[in-house]
Image: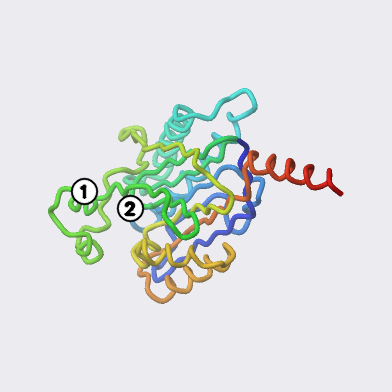
């Protein structure tokens, strides 16, 4: 199976904050159908710490992938973990040169499309979704205090939005003194028309899973879906908000089937 995508679309907005502590890769509207690596990060630490943390994470991870991933190197969870270790060293170097950035940290969403599967890695409360005709096929689980409290029955899911500690996370990229054991998933159930959404909590605090499913169930283009998300967040979100939508174009099996059917039809012309 070989997975191809259509042009991805992204946003990264300051929202109602003084500065944008989110970072994405590819940055801006630079994503193309040829890209295989996508990153969404939400910096924590306040002031310029969060902004620096998310930027350094995106820059370091994409540098590691672009430097060490080639035809002879197989992408696997170990490779991703090595990219995280490299990033943690870059964090150490940045803080050494900028002592006021001590304590900086960032969430991470990573999506890499290999030939036959998607690798999804995440830390913190930024999320990755896989939608199929509006249905959530896959969703990462937040590394947050309130999510743990919900799982333990301490609070109800409807209490999360107003909980005073809703933004407390227990996994993030921080530096080599706090090595991250990142969650990594591999997905092979991928079909043409599926859409991956990577987003920071500025979006998920505004739109519920049901809201997102409703948007992704419409026959809208990825750009139109992202515009609808942006409109809601512009009006309601208190935070920065960033996202990538990566639409799956087709897989090799489907292309082969098309070829067989086309040949079959031409045989009778």
In the rendered image, residue 265, in percent from the top left (x then y), is placed at 79, 47
Could you tell which of marks 1 and 2 lies nearer the N-terminus? 2
Label placed on residue 119: none
**SS class of the residue under badge 1?**
helix
Q: Is residue 20 above or below residue 67?
A: below
Query: 256 left or right of 228?
Result: right
Q: Is residue 13 above or below residue 49?
A: below
Q: Quadrant of the N terminus?
A: top right
Residue drawn at x 42%, y 70% as measured from the top left = 233
The residue to which callout 1 is attached is 148
In the rendered image, residue 223, in percent from the top left (x then y), is placed at 58, 65
Residue drawn at x 63%, y 39% as measured from the top left = 253
Q: Residue furthest right?
A: 269
Residue drawn at x 31%, y 46% as measured from the top left = 103
Residue closer to the observer: 235 or 128? 128
Residue drawn at x 19%, y 63% as measured from the top left = 159
Q: Is residue 225 above or below residue 28?
A: below
Q: CA distance from mark 1 to mark 2?
A: 22 Å
Residue closer to the observer: 221 or 46? 221
**SS class of the residue under badge 2?**
loop
Q: Residue furthest front?
A: 268
Q: State how many labels appear.
A: 2
Question: Neighbour class for label 2 at 10 Å: few (<14), some, many (≥20)?
Answer: some
Tell me which colouring the rendered structure shows: rainbow
Query: 143 left or right of 39?
Result: left
The residue to which callout 2 is attached is 45
Q: Residue furthest bottom?
A: 235
Residue closer to the observer: 133 or 167? 133
In the rendered image, residue 128, in percent from the top left (x then y), is placed at 43, 50
């Amino acid at each position: 199976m070989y997975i191809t995508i259509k042009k991805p679309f992204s946003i990264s907005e300051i929202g109602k904050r003084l500065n944008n502590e989110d970072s994405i890769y590819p940055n801006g509207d630079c994503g193309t159908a040829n890209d295989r690596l996508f990153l969404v990060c939400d910096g924590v630490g306040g002031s310029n710490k969060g902004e620096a943390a998310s930027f350094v994470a995106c820059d370091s991870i994409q540098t590691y992938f672009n430097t060490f991933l080639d035809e002879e190197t197989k992408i696997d969870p170990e490779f991703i973990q090595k990219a995280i270790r490299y990033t943690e060293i870059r964090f150490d170097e940045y803080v050494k040169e900028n002592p006021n950035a001590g304590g900086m940290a960032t969430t991470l969403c990573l999506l890499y499309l290999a030939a036959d599967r998607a690798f999804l890695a995440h830390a913190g409360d930024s999320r990755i979704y896989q939608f199929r005709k509006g249905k959530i096929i896959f969703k990462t689980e937040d590394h947050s205090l309130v999510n743990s409290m919900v799982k333990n029955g301490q609070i109800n899911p409807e209490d999360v939005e107003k909980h005073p500690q809703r933004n407390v996370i227990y996994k993030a990229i921080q530096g080599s003194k706090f090595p991250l054991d990142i969650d990594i998933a591999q997905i092979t159930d991928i079909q043409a028309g599926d859409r991956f959404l990577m987003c920071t909590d500025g979006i998920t605090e505004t739109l519920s899973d049901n809201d997102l499913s409703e948007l992704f169930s419409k026959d809208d283009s990825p750009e139109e879906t992202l515009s609808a998300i942006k409109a809601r967040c512009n009006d309601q979100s208190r935070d920065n908000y960033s996202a990538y939508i990566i639409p799956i174009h087709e897989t090799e099996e489907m292309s082969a089937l098309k070829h067989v059917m086309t040949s079959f039809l031409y045989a009778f012309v």
